[in-house]
Amino acid sequence: DQQVKQNSPSLSVQEGRISILNCDYTNSMFDYFLWYKKYPAEGPTFLISISSIKDKNEDGRFTVFLNKSAKHLSLHIVPSQPGDSAVYFCAANGANSKLTFGKGITLSVRP
Amino acid sequence: NAGVTQTPKFQVLKTGQSMTLQCAQDMNHEYMSWYRQDPGMGLRLIHYSVGAGITDQGEVPNGYNVSRSTTEDFPLRLLSAAPSQTSVYFCASSYSWSYNEQFFGPGTRLTVL
């Protein structure tokens, strides 16, 4: 049973526009959420995180929103740049210390 | 700091062979873990360690063995390689076991024939 779901496998956005990447989860015990970015042939790199006690966290062009009642989070990238083209993984952490990852979404930013 | 290093970068094995994937970190992180990434499957946790001498199983531990004798090193052993273990393997570390981002190594691409 997939506990972290990224239902859209890909997203294509024009440079300068907003990219919105969505993630849903089913386990109500998750209390910390992270987004990772991955380029081909490299390891994932941490992008931004949010605790369940918050509903928004912002870092430069990246903002993560958390809706606990809907068990939904989203990553907003504004403005999108060609260098943002990568695979983005949503991950969730609970009391058992294990990170659970979604399947990832491939973002393509068109120049 | 080198961060998280993994060796080798690429490896081809025959079914039944054994090997060890090496992972080391120089950040004095307590928490280390191994993941495998398969197409369309995301990252799945194989084994993890919350400190030297302490290891535990993740989501997909079968066919793999780990040990943690030092804070720096966390090797992953394939006991008898199978084609189903063809994957990209990532090692990661973090300062603590909870509420901290994990730092990932560059990965090892393993093919089992």
Image (tube, coloured by chain):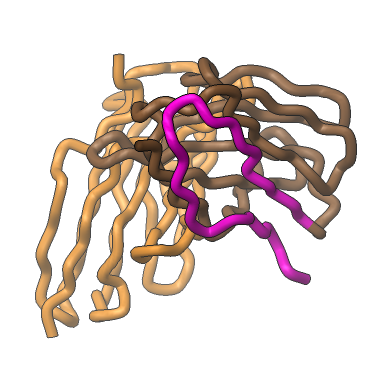
Chain A drawn colour: orange
- The residue shown at (10%, 64%) is A12
Q: Position of residue B76 (x, y in %)?
A: 65, 35
Point out the image quarter for the N terminus of chain A.
top left
Give the chain coloured brown. Answer: B
In the rendered image, residue B35, in percent from the top left (x then y), is placed at 51, 37
Is A78 covered by the magenta stretch?
no
Compare residues A8 and A19 and report the one nearer the observer: A8
Q: In the picture, residue A8 is in which quadrant? A: top left
Residue B2 part of the magenta segment: yes
User: Could you say where residue A19 lies in the image, as x and y percent from the top left?
Assistant: 20, 63
Q: Is residue A72 visible?
A: yes
Q: Is residue A31 visible?
A: no
Residue A47 x, y percent position in the rendering: 47, 60
Q: Which residues are magenta?
A: B1-25
Residue B71, placed above or below residue B69? below
